[in-house]
Image: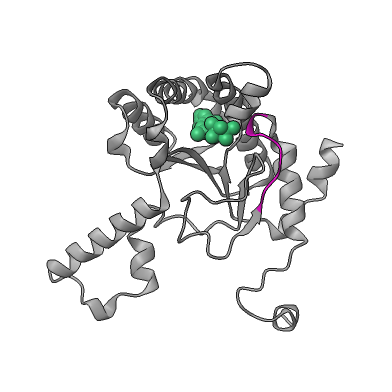
Amino acid sequence: MISEIKSNINREMLPQHIAIIMDGNGRWAKQQGRERVYGHQGGVESVRSVIEGAGEIGIKFLTLYAFSTENWNRPKEEVDALMSLLVRSIHHELDNLMKNQVRLLTIGDMNALPDECRKELLDAIRITAHNTGVSVVLALSYSGRWEIVEMARKIAQQVKNNRLNPEEIQEETVIQNLNTDQIPDPDILIRTGGELRISNFLLWQLAYAEFFFPTKMWPDFRKEDLWQTIVDFQSRERRFGKTGEQVCSH
Ligand code: FPP
């Protein structure tokens, strides 16, 4: 069954970049009468499975929304637990990341993270920098609006320093000043947990992404679910503003 889903994927039409909003950890834990943190721990197993599954079929970029700017407003115990889970997971998984040739990257406000967390991340980014498999982008203390404000600041500074004329500002200028300047736009957005929102995630970059909203909670999501989403994606027609006839005539 598992190998059947995998063999249904057309390797010639792979998405380059899949972005995931990992939602439903808290509800999954509550369903089992446990604390929310138990759900986040369960979610780490899904992160491992999905990274493996992306690597196995040759996906180039996988972005995971691990902690939003708004998540700082959660109860302190939950924020602390998430930060320490992150540090422990990265530390514990480093050998595995190397073995699977995973390259780790981050987007978001690294300066807002606790020192220990930032240090662990920077070490893992440095150690995995030359790996050639899937690039896993952790969105941490990230939000799309935060990133757009940062981009506006950087461009304004360049104008102020006479390095850029306002008339020269193009889409490319914006792209180069986002956190994702080296990363292609996502082809697919997955949000688990059944909510139909993008919650301030990759607002610029998702312009042409195909959206998928599985009802499974994140801790139940596995690589087979990722592969099935890719199969479904491959049966959709992406038009990028053109007509169906124009797309088919290529
Ligand atoms: C959303 O579920 C999930 C998060 C805010 C955190 C996701 C983090 C992990 C899965 C751990 C990350 C670990 C690594 C190594 C990247 P929720 O709490 O909003 O769930 P709910 O909607 O059911 O309340």
Image: magenta residue range: 212-219
Magenta part mainly helix, strand or loop?
loop
Residue lying at 63% horizontally and 22% vertically, measured from the top left: 30
Query: Of all residues shown, which one is farthest toward the left?
Result: 161
**Quarter of the figure with residue 152:** bottom left
**Quarter of the figure with residue 31:** top right
Percent coordinates x, y for residue 85 in the rendering: 47, 22
Percent coordinates x, y for residue 194 in the rendering: 67, 43
Q: Is residue 129 left or right of residue 184?
A: left
Q: How many marks?
A: 0
Of residues 146 and 94, the one nearer the viewer is 146
Query: Of all residues shown, which one is farthest toward the top?
Result: 34
Q: Is residue 130 visible?
A: no
Q: Is residue 167 magenta?
A: no
Of residues 230 and 101, the one nearer the viewer is 230
Q: Is residue 160 left or right of residue 64?
A: left
Of residues 52 and 130, the one nearer the viewer is 52
Residue lying at 61% horizontally and 16% vertically, measured from the top left: 34
**Quarter of the figure with residue 245:** bottom right
Is the residue 203 above or below the residue 246 in the image? above
Q: Is residue 231 visible?
A: yes
Q: Quadrant of the C terminus?
A: bottom right
Please, which colouring scheme is shown? one colour
Percent coordinates x, y for residue 239 in the rendering: 66, 73
Q: Quadrant of the N terminus?
A: top right
Residue lying at 56% horizontally and 29% vertically, measured from the top left: 99
Percent coordinates x, y for residue 112 in the rendering: 29, 36
Is the residue 10 above or below the residue 165 in the image? above
